[in-house]
Image (cartoon, grey):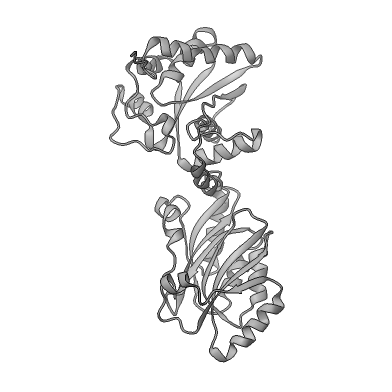
Amino acid sequence: QTFIPPFDDPDVIAGQGTIGMELLNQHGGTIDAIFIPVGGGGLISGIATYIKQLRPEIRIIGVEPEDAASMTTSLQRGRRVTLSHVGQFADGVAVRQVGKEPFRICRKCVDDMVVVSIDEICAAIKDIFEDTRSIMEAAGALSVAGLKKYVQGDVTVNGDLVAVTTGANMNFDRLRHVSERAEIGERREAILCVTIPERPGSFRRFCRIIGKRAVTEFNYRFADDRKANIYVGLQVHDDEDIGSLLDKLHANDYPSIDLTDNEMAKLHIRHMVGGRAPQVKDEMLFRFQFPERPGALGNFLDTLGDRFNISLFHYRNHGADYGRVLCGIQVPGEQRALLKSFLNEIGYEWSDESNNAAYRLFLG
């Protein structure tokens, strides 16, 4: 058997460098910079060697994930560094130590390095899909994420920017995570914890304050007689818009915390808001379905009105035609027939889940 090194070998590096030759042969315009994903360093060192020999004015920029930035760290310290841990989301570039020969070449030929977050990688996967209808793996979309982040800085671009995409071995079960985080990676979704008064009508007032913004997620469970902490996702335009939104909420006496970059909140807390609420009396649980369109959630709350207190609320926009809400409503026994009559009149499909075993086991 013959072991072929994946990146730390001159012949392997030369083979990967042919991508640089193809790139120059096929692109007739002016190239300002080439963005290349970096794992062990073979690909970038091969392309950089060829490009710098023929077109030294073209900048070579490597891209790594924040949790596997072995080349970035090594170049900063002037020696090869072995990382104690590397993240596995972009497993195609999850290398603890870059190759000896790639490191030597990169010190001479690489102009800059960019590190990107998982959310930014997810946004890049979405961008590539929307442009080409191809689904890249995380490592394959790394260069696009780096290009997007690079141009957001204070840089001057004098020509085309090229991103080398390198693989499409995406596991199907990972698509769920990618779709969940892509909007955050593009800074199109903000995740907030907002404190509102615990009284009927508070949800509706909150929806009026945020205006026509699309609500992407809404999680709440009664816990205190005076105030309620809600986990809410909102559509935004950029980081500046998030700041403006927080200022508006604070100005209306809704204390708010930005959780958009809080990894634990995004991975775990969103699924754990709730639990049993023994102090909640006369609770009934309903599932609702309504047409998904801008303002749909606010219209739903307006239709429900202030006559009943909401003790549990869960909603997540999954891009479907219909929005689905799980809602707990406090209603005394003598008013239950009135409530069901009212629900029949509001025009939304609903079902009573008060006797559902899952509700009784975990929430009731």
Residue 135 visible? The answer is yes
Where residue 112 sits: x, y (%)?
Answer: 45, 24
Report the residue at 62% width, 23% height from top: 160
Closer to the camera in the image, 300 or 73: 300
Closer to the camera in the image, 199 or 15: 15
Number of numbered tags placed on the structure image: 0
Report the residue at 53% width, 7% height from top: 54
Q: Residue furthest front?
A: 1
Q: Residue furthest top?
A: 53
Q: Is residue 345 above or below residue 136?
A: below
Where residue 97 sits: x, y (%)?
Answer: 32, 26
Where residue 351 sits: x, y (%)?
Answer: 61, 73
Q: Is residue 275 above or below residue 158?
A: below
Closer to the camera in the image, 281 or 307: 281
Where residue 222 sits: x, y (%)?
Answer: 46, 74
Residue 110 visible? The answer is no
Q: Is residue 234 above or below residue 10?
A: below
Work out which quarter of the rendered image holds the C terminus and state it.
bottom left
Report the residue at 58% width, 13% height from top: 22
Closer to the camera in the image, 11 or 151: 11
Work out which quarter of the rendered image holds the N terminus and state it.
top left
Report the residue at 37% width, 26% height from top: 71
